[in-house]
């Protein structure tokens, strides 16, 4: 009788598809919230491998780890998809010191990713502080020979923190070349963060080939405020030493697991995160979280015996941080093979409590997914909006017009950790991480069941 | 011209009330997110005073701090409202040790609030583990002389963690008396948490006067799992020593600030949190956060020059944790004075990222506040639902049918810290705390402007 009761309940619930859907989502949620392996997987990735920048030995270790983790989770087919990746190395410990009227003070800095080093002899010059590119242009005659300090503040009044990041990150991306245009010899950028600590945040810079490549570092917020105060009263010199350089490209890999579809095996659904991270941190939120959530969706599907109608690919992308070569390769090979990609979902906004999904798709498709909102909302993603996806799945959309979705967890803490040394396993909460995977599993399941 | 432009903009925006509302909410939000003092206030409260249980010296220090903080924030009138509060003291360091076939092991325990101590001689007995009251009843003949271990797990599948807390906390509240009924000499409860650490979580227990009062402690989750495993293989004895006792009630205070209404001064709106906390932690999330957010709403209103139509009371309630005497006194005095309380809002669910407001009010009133949802949603509280309020404002509703609201931040991390030693300042994020205050300010402002 004990065994009959659940069976009877199941039959009662199956009589409408909405009930089937909610019952099934409840089932996968219970599996993840009760037997979840995402947190343990994240511990292994971050604590035994750590930072894993494209081209590094840790990149290869992470690929091997990911391959095995996908297999353990129950992947039908597992493979590595080769792609050439850039191989930037930091080359040593980044150093900087300020020399003011009151004396010397060490600054906590990190060289920007892809930046050229100062060489072992270092660099020393007076600092010119500007708040914006407009101020830089206005002061262009004062720039030659100086280190330009872009002290553009992260805009706290933007409630969605990714907007503030979009607003501020141009100083990291374009700052060095904009300053070099006027003869600067180095650049310091205020970290793109509203944290209360002093950790400097790295991230990719992009040199404009028209101008000299000059060394560039990020500085923590407390040091930035201190430096700004000193400069306001009298000239400050900074000496800095960085050793970044590019080695020749090497072969990296997207690591891919697959559940083969039973009804429409040629229709492919992709779910993923990126396996690489910056070298100065464990890359727990960015984007170990997205990787272990992706693996968890696979594990949970297998654990409850789900056989998808369509083929689902679980992809740990290579080289998101400083090249996007993994995402490009994935779409390129899909095109070459004539694959049909009907949907892609990425988790690359931290392992925080899930709140929303952002979609890049047609209005008609958005109308269809919007009807699923009430099924997913009880697990956290109560907001569905247009606009969103992920850097690694963007090429699928550009190649095939594949509809995209991005998991949007609560964003308030993300830029406390982003690309900084405190992006560690300890900054991730087990339950928030698992709930992200629950919401991803629910969306993937609905797309698999009903198409798009 | 520079000064005229903002004025012109203001006139343009004022032509519909929805625009006025959104403009005004943006203004108070910018004030809080740019010049917010909540985080600094929380630092002072938690780091210079710390735990502040009713009756303790820290209770009085916190009252003085709160009084000054309300004055500094700009309160028109500030006062302390006296009420007698219970004075339970822990009396020393709680200790426990397990004696198994393999040897001795220290257990990390904390006595339950309000519990009687073992006395200095301690207590030692065999442990009877049960998962539920039903199992206890079934094993009632085995209970006499034993320490009963309620190992009821926190239900991870409940996405809303307060549901899991409601489900599990009866073992803390009723467990000791239910076990004493069958002759138990002590109780251990599994902490009401899904954390990954081993910190024990305290909280109030309530003795039933029909049965002996017996000592009771909470145990961390790792120790609980370890103990359960040992007991499964062979009998385990536990020795425990706790020194809790009640001293005579003392006079404590609700600390109250006020902005006098300009149009309807007799219509009172209350916003608050509770000033007391358990003694084993800094009480940062529970409920330092609610107190400093309350003060921040006042500060921001004054900073932008807002003169409310109705009288707004900013209340730091006494003795929420083990008596609720502060909330009771507030309603009692309001009744005695014939005050008119039109709305009350409490923040007592942690200083996490705001997500929702829960309301206890008539359908008609809920319809009215629901129309404001789109004004508040951009700041985090995108969900409005019936059901919610706060323990300290409950008596207002029972006395006057005052409509209530409770701020509902993201709840996933709350029970990692609740009543445990890690509920410290460091566990609170500045921006999440401030956003909570923004949402509270917006709701209070709308109620002040439009009534209920």
Image (cartoon, coloured by chain):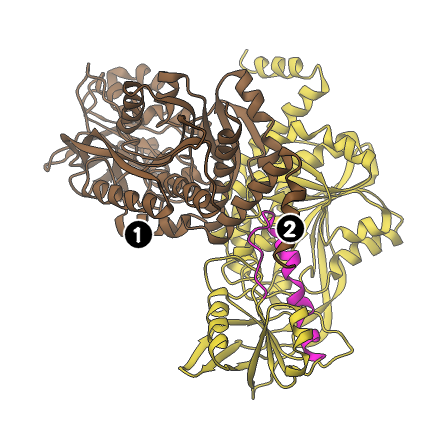
Chain colours: A brown, B yellow
- Residues at circles 1 and 2 in contact by the CB criterion of under 8 Å: no
User: Where is residue B197, by image quadrant?
Assistant: bottom left
Chain of the residue that carries numbered disc 1 in the rendered image:
A
Mark 2 nearby-residue class (10 Å; few <14, some 14–19, many ≥20) = many
Q: Is B163 placed left or right of A227 in the picture? A: right
Quadrant including the C terminus of chain B: top right
Q: Which residue is mark 1?
A: A47
**Residue found farthest to the left:** A121
Q: Which residue is mark 2?
A: B348
Look at the image and say whether residue B163 sits in the magenta stretch: yes
* Residue at x 54%, y 51% (from the top left corner): B42
Instruction: Name the chain under label 2.
Output: B
Q: Nearer the viewer, residue B31 or B26?
A: B26
- Mark seen at residue A134: none
The image position of residue B204, as x and y in percent, is: 66, 66
**Element type where label 2 sits in the image:** loop
For image coordinates 23% across by 40% down, the residue present is A59
Residues B311 and A109: in front is: A109
| Rendered position, B58 above or below B343 | below
Q: Quick one: quadrant of the N terminus of chain B? A: top right
Badge 1 crowding class, 10 Å Cα cut-off, few under 14, some 14 to 19, many 20 or more, is some
Residue at disc 1, secondary structure: helix
| Residue at the farthest bottom position | B121
Q: Main secondary structure of the magenta part?
A: helix
Q: Please determine whether, in this image, residue B318 is positioned above or below residue A442.
A: below
Query: Between residues A140 and B416, which one lies in front from this camera angle?
Result: B416
Question: Is residue A206 positioned above or below A257 on the image?
Answer: above
Q: CA distance from mark 1 to mark 2?
A: 35 Å
Q: Which residues are magenta?
A: B152-181
Q: Nearer the viewer, mark 1 or mark 2?
A: 1
Q: Residue placed at 28% from the left, 42% from the top?
A: A67
In screen coordinates, is A224 left or right of B306? left
């Amino acid at each position: 009788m004990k065994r009959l009761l659940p069976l009877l309940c199941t039959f009662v619930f199956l009589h409408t598809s909405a009930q089937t859907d909610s019952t099934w989502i409840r089932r996968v949620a219970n599996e993840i919230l009760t037997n979840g392996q995402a947190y343990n997987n994240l511990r292994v990735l971050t604590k035994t491998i750590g930072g894993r920048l494209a081209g590094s030995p840790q990149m290869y270790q992470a690929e091997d780890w990911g391959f095995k983790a996908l297999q353990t989770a129950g992947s039908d087919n597992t493979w590595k998809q080769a792609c050439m990746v850039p191989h930037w190395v930091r080359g040593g410990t980044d150093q900087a010191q300020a020399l003011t009227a009151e004396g010397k003070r060490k600054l906590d800095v990190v060289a920007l990713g892809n930046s050229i080093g100062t060489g072992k002899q270092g660099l020393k010059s007076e600092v010119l502080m500007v708040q914006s590119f407009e101020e830089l242009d206005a002061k262009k005659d004062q720039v030659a020979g100086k280190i330009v300090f872009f002290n553009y503040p992260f805009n706290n009044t933007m409630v969605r923190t990714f907007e503030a990041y979009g607003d501020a990150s141009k100083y990291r991306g374009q700052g060095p070349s904009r300053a070099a245009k006027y003869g600067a010899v180095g650049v310091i950028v205020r970290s793109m963060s509203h944290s209360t600590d002093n950790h400097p945040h790295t991230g990719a810079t992009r040199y404009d080939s028209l101008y000299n490549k000059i060394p560039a570092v990020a500085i923590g917020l407390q040091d930035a405020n201190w430096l700004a105060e000193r400069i306001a009263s009298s000239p400050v010199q900074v000496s800095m030493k960085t050793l970044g350089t590019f080695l020749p490209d090497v072969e990296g890999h997207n690591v891919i697991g697959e559940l083969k579809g039973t009804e429409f095996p040629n229709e492919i659904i992709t779910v993923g995160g990126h396996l690489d991270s910056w070298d100065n941190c464990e890359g727990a939120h960015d984007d170990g979280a997205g990787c272990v959530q992706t693996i968890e969706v696979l594990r949970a599907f297998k654990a409850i015996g789900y056989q998808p109608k369509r083929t689902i690919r679980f992809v740990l992308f290579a080289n998101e941080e400083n090249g996007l070569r993994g995402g490009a390769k994935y779409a390129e090979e899909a095109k070459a093979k004539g694959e049909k990609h009907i949907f892609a979902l990425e988790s690359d906004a931290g392992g925080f409590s899930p709140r929303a999904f952002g979609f890049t798709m047609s209005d008609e498709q958005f109308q269809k997914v919007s009807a699923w909102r009430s099924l997913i909302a009880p697990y956290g993603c109560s907001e569905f909006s247009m606009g969103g996806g992920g850097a690694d799945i963007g090429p699928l959309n550009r190649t095939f017009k594949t509809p995209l979705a991005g998991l949007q967890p609560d964003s308030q803490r993300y830029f406390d950790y982003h690309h900084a040394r405190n992006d560690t396993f300890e900054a991730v909460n087990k339950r928030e991480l698992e709930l992200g995977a629950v919401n991803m599993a629910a969306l993937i399941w609905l797309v698999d069941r009903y198409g798009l």
